[in-house]
Each structure stands twice: as C-alpha cells, then as structure tokens.
Image (tube, rainbow, N blue to C red):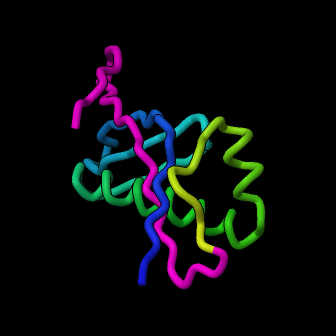
C-alpha cells in the first residue's frame, strides 16, 4: 500500500525549450535541473524528481530539517513504518521565452 504524503509548498520552476528541442526545467531554490523530450514528460519528471529527492531525505533522516529550512509543511504525517511512500509537492512552472520575460502557467 502506498502512503501519499502531501507537502504544502509553492516551488517555482523556470521552463523552456533547449536548442535541441528538449524541454528543460530549472528550480533555483533547490538547485535542480530536469530535461525531458516533451512538456508533458517534463511535468511528470519534475514530480518524480521531487519525490525521489524527498524519499532520499527521509531515508537519511534529513527530511524534517529540510522541511523546516524551506518553510514547507506536511499535510498529515508519515506513518511510523511506511512500506511505500510517495510525496506530492506542488510546483509552479513559469514559461521562459527565448528573449523575453517569464510568464506563469496555470494548470
């Protein structure tokens, strides 16, 4: 059984197409970069990347400190002995134009 852990956060990602046509997402606050073939893949890959990062922090007992340092909170609690955990972190993609300002995308 999968335990879904929802995180209260609003994480900005700068998104744009690279020279080779791939989509790139950059999260400055977490110093993460993700590259994908399509926009849809990028959105999924960002979610998977955040989930994997938080799982690693949970395993290393650094999750509580990370959450406090970033001002994030969990909605609910992690069970004492979770078998499988999945983290759900909301993020805000901002489309970056080649030579113009960013614009927030509404999902």
Which sits in the foreground, 6 or 70? 6
Which sits in the foreground, 4 or 31? 4
- 41 vs 32, left or right, is left
Residue 63 in magenta?
no
Q: How many marks?
A: 0
Quadrant into which the N terminus falls? bottom left
Q: Position of residue 107 (x, y in %)?
A: 22, 38
Residue visible at 43% across and 56% down in the picture:
88
Question: Considering only vertical position in the picture, is 51 above or below 27?
Answer: below
Residue visible at 77% across and 66% down in the picture:
61
Q: Residue furthest top?
A: 101
Which sits in the foreground, 66 or 98? 66
Residue visible at 49% across and 61% down in the picture:
5
Question: Considering only vertical position in the picture, is 8 above or below 57?
Answer: above
Q: Position of residue 98 (x, y in %)?
A: 31, 25
Residue visible at 34% across and 20% down in the picture:
102
Q: Position of residue 101 (x, y in %)?
A: 34, 15
- 36 vs 1, left or right, is left
Q: Position of residue 60 (x, y in %)?
A: 76, 69
Question: Considering only vertical position in the picture, is 41 above or below 30?
Answer: below
Residue 90, image quadrant: top left
Q: Which residues are magenta?
A: 80-107
């Amino acid at each position: 059984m999968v335990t879904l852990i929802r995180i209260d956060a609003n994480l900005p990602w700068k998104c744009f197409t690279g020279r080779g046509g791939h989509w790139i997402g950059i999260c400055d606050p977490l110093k993460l970069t993700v590259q994908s073939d399509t926009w849809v893949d990028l959105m999924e890959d960002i979610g998977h990347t955040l989930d994997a990062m938080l799982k690693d922090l949970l395993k290393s007992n650094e999750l509580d400190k990370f959450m406090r340092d970033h001002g994030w909170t969990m909605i609910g609690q992690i069970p004492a002995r979770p078998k499988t955990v999945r983290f759900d972190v909301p993020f805000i993609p901002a489309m970056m134009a080649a030579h113009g300002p960013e614009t927030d995308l509404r999902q």
